[in-house]
């Protein structure tokens, strides 16, 4: 590694990572009619140098939310194509992080599907309001079901401040959710293959 007193004698991995970060804005993202644009954000950057040496390695951690019909593999290929050219001596590698669980793939359930109509009817009966369908831009456990082609809708209690230490649920909405789900279970007849 180059000494910090003579940084031009080596390639600085952090500087190269900064170029990659800037290039991320130009990486094309897929679009879905209902789910909008796929997105990619940096979650972390890590580099170390021993003593006063120029860092030789830098790791960027990115998160990519997919939209159908993207796959993790197709998104990685698009990212690799969008990486900037690097100076001599700098190598950039884009790969999947090791993870204990599979990637949660995107899905879309048509509001006219049988399950969506049953859920909407149950909400209308119990709550007295029509459903306003909203597409989720994030991922959660339901992606594991919906991405397998099983029609999936999400319904739950009122709350807010998701993913913060101040996340909350309105306890008074829990009996309403119970009643809606009971009605869905009473009215739902799964399709027979």
Image: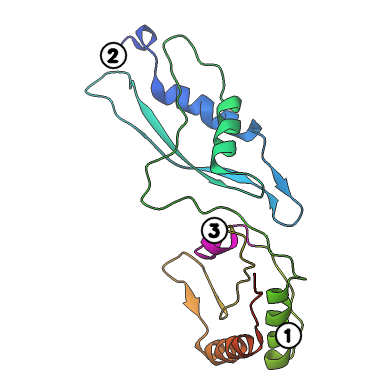
Nearer to me, 90 or 149: 149
Q: Residues within 10 Å of mark 2 (few under 14, many from 20)?
A: some
Query: Which label is found at residue 3?
Result: none
- Which residue in the protein does label 1 denote? 121
Quick one: quadrant of the C terminus? Answer: bottom right
Query: Residue at (70%, 67%) from the top-left corner?
Result: 134
- Which residue in the protein does label 2 denote? 1
x, y (%) of residue 56?
33, 20
x, y (%) of residue 30?
69, 42
* Side (left or right) of 89 relative to 116: left
- SS under mark 2: loop
Q: Are marks 3 and 1 in contact (CB under 8 Å)?
A: no
Query: Residue at (30%, 12%) from the top-left corner?
Result: 2
Nearer to me, 153 or 17: 153
Query: Residue at (62%, 34%) from the top-left corner?
Result: 25
x, y (%) of residue 20?
52, 27
Nearer to me, 12 or 157: 157
The alpha-carbon separation of the residues under discs 2 and 3 comes to: 41 Å
Give the quadrant of residue 90.
top left
Query: Residue at (57%, 21%) from the top-left corner?
Result: 84
Looking at the rendering, the stretch of residues picked out in magenta corresponds to 136-146
Q: Is residue 71 magenta?
A: no
- Which residue in the protein does label 3 denote? 139
x, y (%) of residue 160?
54, 73
Q: Are marks 2 and 3 in contact (CB under 8 Å)?
A: no
Which residue lies most toward the front here?
193
Q: Is residue 142 magenta?
A: yes
- Does label 1 or label 2 sit earlier along the sequence? 2
- Does label 3 or label 1 sit earlier along the sequence? 1
Give the quadrant of residue 137.
bottom right
In the depicted structure, whether residue 63 falls above or below residue 85: below
The alpha-carbon separation of the residues under discs 1 and 2 comes to: 66 Å
């Amino acid at each position: 590694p180059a000494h910090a007193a003579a940084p031009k004698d080596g390639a600085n991995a952090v500087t190269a990572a900064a170029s990659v970060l800037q290039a991320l804005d130009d990486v094309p993202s897929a679009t879905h009619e209902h789910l909008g644009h796929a997105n990619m954000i940096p979650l972390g950057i890590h580099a170390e140098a021993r003593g006063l040496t120029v860092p030789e390695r830098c790791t960027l951690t990115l998160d990519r939310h997919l939209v159908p019909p993207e796959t993790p593999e197709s998104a990685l290929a698009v990212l690799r194509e969008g990486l900037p050219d690097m100076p001599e001596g700098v190598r950039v590698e884009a790969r999947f992080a090791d993870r204990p669980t599979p990637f949660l793939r995107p899905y879309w359930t048509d509001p006219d599907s049988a399950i969506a109509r049953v859920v909407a009817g149950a909400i209308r009966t119990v709550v007295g309001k029509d459903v306003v369908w909203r597409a989720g831009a994030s991922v959660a456990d339901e992606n594991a079901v919906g991405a397998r082609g099983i029609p999936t809708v999400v319904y739950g209690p009122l709350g807010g401040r998701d993913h913060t230490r101040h996340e909350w649920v309105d306890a008074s909405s829990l009996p309403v959710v119970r009643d809606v789900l009971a009605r869905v279970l009473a009215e739902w007849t799964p399709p027979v293959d």
